[in-house]
Image (cartoon, helix red, strand yellow):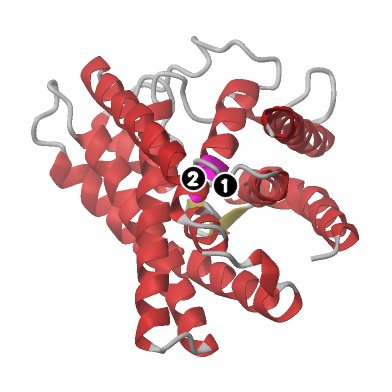
Amino acid sequence: MHIPDGFLDPISCAITYLIMVVYGVYAYLKTKGQWTTENISQITVLASAIFATQMLNWPIPGGTSLHFVGGALAGILMNPYFGFFIMFLVLFVQCIIFHDGGITTLGANVLNMAIIDVLVGYALYKLMSKLGKENKNYKLIGAFLGGWMGITLAGIAAGTEIGISPNFAYTLSVTVPVMAIWHFILGIIEGIITAAVLAYLLSKAPHMVKG
Amino acid sequence: MKIKRYWILIGILLIISPIFGIILADMVGYHEPLDIAAEKLGLQDLTEQMNWTPFLDYTVPGIPDEIGYIIAGLIGIFVIFLIGYILQYLAGKKK
């Protein structure tokens, strides 16, 4: 899911960096006054747990794998704006310390995993919570769908970004299906993990579920 | 969640991480869907040419990959907490 250096043309890199900065400012304004030591502590704990979980790839015999992303979970456990900062922290450290995800493509990776994944996951979770009138089972279904669809749409976004290139105008028909199909299949595991973590926290530490 | 349980969880994740990140990767020889899509387009990964870090791909120079992967995980978590503490310090100072 992490787009490395070299996969995007300079224009795509610049546009996605701009989106990252503008959304980051917007997210900061939406959370202004809420940067308490308690919230920062939760951001740090969640970011470190997501970072550790992302180191586990799920291999599928035949040559494909995926790792947990955690964007939907971050949004559900806090809110989509703090969720952005949780995922940004993870992606920034992965990029700077381990060069996992390119520096020129950091904006695209943030767009996919810290904005799209978080917003889609959070929106589906809230929709199901509302439909079920805050019933726990509906929340868990929302978390499952949020995790699943969040990573699927983030994958499609990544496929679109690498497919949109001035040099390869026809390639969207190649990249988007590959990314969509594999993320749709493997994303079920993301949904299960998201719902399982939420179920655990709702029963053991409900104060940590703020989204 | 109790902080002790959190650290146990992190410890377990890091200890088993080489199984999923190194050992199974070598056995199955897998690629992420992104790599498959990029391969079809002939896109060139410039990570190694542009590299600046000694911890590229969660390795630690001079240490076997499996152990290096765990140490890299610890380094990443340390840096995340360091940034968190700086933010907490700034938030406390502002208050």
Q: Is residue A67 above or below residue B62?
A: below
Front in this rendered view, residue B22 or A146: A146
Residue for point 58% across, 36% down: A89
Residue for point 42% across, 38% down: A29
Are there few (<14), some (14-19), or many (20+) residues within 10 Å of tag 1?
Answer: some
Are there few (<14), some (14-19), or many (20+) residues within 10 Å of tag 2?
Answer: some
Hey, which residue is sitting farthest left in the picture? A170
Q: Quadrant of the N terminus of chain A?
A: top left
Q: Amino acid at mark 2?
A: Thr
Name the chain under label 1: A
Q: Which residue is mark 1?
A: A34
Residue A143 position, x and y percent, is: 48, 72
Taking the image as drawn, is residue A56 in sight? yes
Q: Amino acid at mark 1?
A: Gln
The disc placed on residue A31 is 2
Residue A190 position, x and y percent, is: 51, 64
Kind of element beneath mark 1: loop
| Mark 1 touches mark 2? (CB < 8 Å) | yes
| Residue B58: quadrant of the picture | top right
Residue for point 68% across, 74% down: A206
Residue A149 position, x and y percent, is: 36, 64
Q: Is residue B4 left or right of residue A4?
A: right
Q: Is residue A84 magenta?
A: yes
Q: Is residue A172 magenta?
A: no
Chain part drawn in magenta: A83-87
Q: Is residue A102 above or below residue A57?
A: above
